């Protein structure tokens, strides 16, 4: 099928506005990566401190720690996604390093393999050639099916299935998978070493538990919200994705680093994540919001995708 129609920024924005929202900062991408890891440290060591204080405090605080950790793990994945678009840093080598090591390796992703895969998704959004079509095609679904998916995520079944396939491919000597697994294991070893030197096993175990549970759940909800049950497939580029408004809790979990502005990202994929909110406001001022798929919150999205 032909590539999806793209939006022309010259038809939408004034020249000075377009320059402003596509300008790459030399420091902001680095700061966002550091921010993600600072939140990880806070949640992991804070959870460990609760266990050291009292076992009951540990039990009460652990769900919060896992939620914050899973949200930042998703955040690191989102920043890797920006790196795949060349938007983390104006220097190409710095951008690729940021997207490969402190973000991609954290959750077992390879920047370069993801870049090729993801740009194909942009080119053929919701068409047969779209490699992400399987994420939205099952919807709408029934409530029991969605519940089973969430249970598989929160019990570690999704994580185990994905890692088993990834590690098996690495053992077979797959060209890109083996280095990806190697980077993933190296970074986990670094995190374990830091955990043992500073506090003990608990911070690392909380990180690993979140990677196997809340991260998987938040990743699924984010994927659902982006394209499921949208009118994507028409010739209008303003229908290719959904933007979901996100409050504080959503931004800490399923929508870190402005990923909820997904319609804006598909319209203008040269805009870095930290300018997506401004892009949304400019589109509203120009009268484009009625053409877009907008949801007031993630609960609304989940209601839409259930029969």
Image (cartoon, rainbow, N blue to C red):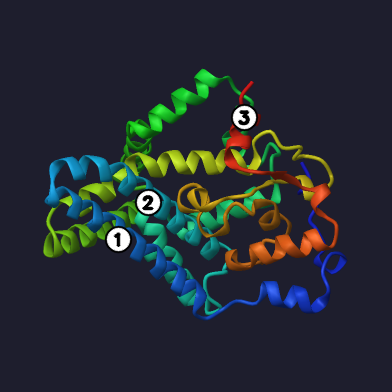
Q: Earlier in the sequence, mark 3 or mark 1?
A: 1
Give how far apart the Cα atoms at labels 2 and 3 are: 24 Å
Residue placed most toward the observer, 135 or 238: 238
Image side of residue 230 versus residue 195, left or right = right
Are the residues at dot 2 and dot 3 in contact (C-beta closer than 8 Å)? no
Image side of residue 76 versus residue 170, left or right = right
Classify residue 195 by image quadrant.
Answer: bottom left
Q: Earlier in the sequence, mark 2 or mark 1?
A: 1
**Residue 199 seen in this snapshot:** yes
**Residue 191 location (% of width, % of height):** 23, 60
Q: Residues within 10 Å of mark 3 (few under 14, many from 20)?
A: few
Position of the N terminus by quadrant: top right
Q: Which residue is mark 2?
A: 68
**Residue 172 seen in this snapshot:** no
Residue placed most toward the observer, 203 or 62: 62
Q: Residues within 10 Å of mark 1 (few under 14, many from 20)?
A: some
**Residue 19 location (% of width, % of height):** 73, 77
**Residue 234 location (% of width, % of height):** 82, 41
Disc 2 element: helix
Residue at x 64%, y 54% (from the top left corner): 261
Q: Earlier in the sequence, mark 2 or mark 3?
A: 2
The tag on residue 303 is 3
Residue placed most toward the observer, 1 or 32: 32
């Amino acid at each position: 099928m032909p590539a999806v129609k793209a939006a022309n920024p010259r038809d939408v924005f004034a020249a000075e506005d377009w320059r402003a929202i596509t300008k790459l900062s030399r420091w902001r991408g680095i700061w966002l990566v550091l921010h993600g890891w600072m939140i990880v440290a806070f949640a992991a060591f804070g959870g460990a401190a609760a266990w050291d204080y009292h076992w009951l405090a540990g039990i009460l605080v652990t769900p919060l720690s896992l939620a914050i950790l899973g949200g930042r793990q998703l955040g690191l994945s989102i920043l890797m996604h920006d790196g795949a678009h060349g938007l983390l840093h104006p220097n190409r080598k710095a951008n690729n390093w940021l997207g490969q090591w402190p973000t991609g390796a954290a959750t077992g992703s390879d920047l370069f393999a993801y870049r090729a895969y993801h740009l194909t998704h942009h080119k053929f959004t919701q068409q047969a050639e779209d490699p992400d079509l399987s994420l939205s095609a099952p919807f709408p679904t029934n409530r029991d099916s969605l519940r089973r998916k969430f249970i598989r995520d929160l019990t570690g079944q999704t994580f185990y299935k994905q890692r088993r396939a990834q590690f098996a491919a690495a053992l077979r000597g797959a060209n890109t998978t083996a280095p990806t697994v190697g980077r993933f294991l190296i970074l986990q070893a670094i995190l374990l070493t830091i955990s043992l030197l500073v506090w003990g096993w608990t911070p690392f175990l909380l990180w690993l538990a979140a990677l196997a549970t809340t991260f998987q759940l938040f990743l699924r909800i984010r994927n659902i919200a982006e394209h499921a049950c949208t009118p994507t497939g028409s010739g209008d580029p303003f229908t290719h994705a959904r933007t979901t408004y996100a409050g504080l809790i959503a931004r800490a979990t399923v929508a870190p680093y402005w990923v909820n502005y997904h319609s804006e990202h598909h319209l203008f994929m040269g805009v870095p994540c930290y300018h997506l909110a401004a892009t949304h406001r400019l589109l509203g001022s120009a009268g484009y919001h009625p053409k877009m798929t907008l949801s007031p919150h993630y609960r609304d999205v989940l209601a839409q995708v259930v029969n």
